[in-house]
């Protein structure tokens, strides 16, 4: 996620320059063809405008729908923040044994496993899908072949939080994060069976854990179900059709005898084509809020903020620092 006030103009141009370059080259070819053929190949601007209006409305629909996916993802992770704090504070308040060391050990056991769940979930959400922009992952953090790196990277982050035996039990499972929550629920039930938790306390913890299951499922729904490709594809192809018509329509405005004014078609065509493809590109890069690119929901930074809160609840001394933005991007 970009956290500065605005994207710089040069950054925006660099990110989206290809449609402008192609538009200029295409318009140059159209103007040159008309000049060398000495023929009027212009189209009335009015029907081209009607097509442009229709495309603009469609791009607006697509961008609104794409933004809804991103905003829903952010709300889901806001819920994870709240439920994580509720879970940790409830564990500390409810689980009180005779010995302080045993009490603190249980607190760490359950809260560290919750941190392990957070870690496993964000790794799973960063795995590649074929419809995502894997070539545009932030270098050094989420690389295109992250699927092959999954367990190698996960080992380093999970083993400080759970035992190797527990990790090895999760490794063959299809959904590690779901299995971690299942283990939490079983252990809460065991604490009730031992009389450490009463019925109300067990119910409270169960409700929080079930809410975390719901939030994981909502995240997975966004991750595993792409923005419907018929809508995404139609936005792209209609933008290309409109862009193909733009130079011919502008010839009717700037044209005539193909003297100097006709060449003004070239920069204006490039500008119009760039604007429409920029709108299409913004929607395209907002569809997948967990793909590890520059416009993601910053779930890594959110997970670190949760970890800081939970470790402070445990009154630990060594607290990790919040993640800071690199070159304006927070992941």
Image (tube, rainbow, N blue to C red):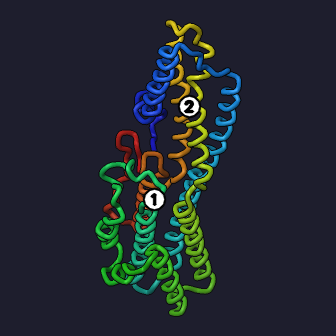
First reached walking from the N terminus: tag 2 or tag 1: 1
Residue at 46% of width from left, 62% of height from top?
Answer: 125
Q: Position of residue 106 (x, y in %)?
A: 42, 80
Disc 2 marks which residue?
A: 244
Looking at the image, residue 306 sits to the left or right of residue 165; the answer is right
Image position of 214 with respect to 279: above or below: below
Residue at point 55% right, 58% down? 226
Secondary structure type for disc 2: helix
Q: Is residue 146 above or below residue 98?
A: above
Q: Residues within 10 Å of mark 2 (few under 14, many from 20)?
A: some
Alpha carbon distance from label 2 to label 1? 29 Å
Instruction: Give the answer, above or below, for where 141 lies relative to 40.
Output: below
Q: Residue at x 61, y 53 (%)?
A: 230
**Label 1: element kind:** loop
Q: List x then y, in percent, for residue 261.
A: 53, 8
How far from the left and from the top, in percent, is residue 305? Answer: 44, 56
Image quadrant where residue 53 sits: top right
Front residue of 169 and 45: 45
The residue pinned by badge 1 equals 130
Viewer-proximal residue among 14 and 331: 14
Q: Name which residue lies at 47% across and 46% down.
A: 295
Residue 267 seen anywhere in this rendered image of the structure: no
Q: Residues within 10 Å of mark 1 (few under 14, many from 20)?
A: few
- Seen from the viewer's position, the closer of residues 310 and 126 is 126
Residue 232 visible from this viewpoint:
yes
* Depicted 36 relative to depicted 180: above or below: above
**Tag 2–tag 1 contact (CB < 8 Å):** no
Query: Of the numbered discs in the image, which one, if any, rests on residue 263?
Result: none
* Quadrant of the rendered image containing residue 116: bottom left
């Amino acid at each position: 996620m970009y956290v500065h006030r605005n994207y710089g103009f040069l950054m925006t141009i660099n990110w989206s320059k290809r449609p402008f370059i192609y538009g200029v080259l295409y318009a140059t070819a159209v103007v040159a063809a008309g000049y060398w053929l000495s023929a009027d190949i212009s189209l009335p601007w009015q029907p081209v405008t009607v097509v442009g209006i229709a495309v603009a409305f469609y791009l607006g629909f697509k961008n609104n729908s794409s933004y809804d996916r991103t905003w829903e993802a952010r709300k889901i992770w806001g819920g994870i923040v709240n439920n994580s704090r509720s879970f940790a504070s409830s564990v500390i308040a409810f689980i009180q044994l005779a010995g302080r060391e045993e009490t603190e050990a249980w607190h760490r056991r359950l809260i560290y496993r919750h941190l392990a769940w957070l870690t496993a979930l964000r790794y799973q959400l960063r795995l590649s899908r074929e419809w995502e922009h894997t070539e545009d992952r932030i270098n050094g953090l989420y690389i295109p072949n992250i699927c092959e790196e999954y367990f190698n990277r996960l080992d380093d982050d999970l083993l400080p939080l759970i035992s190797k035996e527990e990790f090895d039990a999760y490794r063959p499972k299809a959904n590690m994060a779901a299995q971690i929550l299942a283990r939490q629920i079983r252990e809460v039930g065991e604490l009730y069976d031992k009389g450490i938790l009463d019925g109300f306390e067990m119910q409270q913890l169960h409700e929080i854990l079930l809410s975390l299951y719901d939030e994981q499922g909502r995240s997975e729904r966004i991750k595993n179900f792409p923005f419907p490709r018929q809508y995404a594809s139609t936005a792209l192809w209609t933008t290309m059709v409109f862009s193909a018509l733009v130079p011919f329509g502008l010839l009717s405005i700037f044209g005539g005898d193909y003297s100097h004014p006709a060449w003004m078609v070239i920069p204006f065509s490039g500008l119009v084509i760039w604007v429409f493809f920029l709108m299409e590109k913004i929607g395209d890069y907002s569809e997948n809020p967990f793909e590890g690119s520059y416009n993601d929901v910053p779930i890594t930074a959110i997970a670190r903020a949760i970890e800081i809160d939970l470790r402070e609840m445990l009154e630990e001394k060594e607290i990790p620092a919040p993640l800071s933005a690199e070159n304006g991007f927070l992941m």
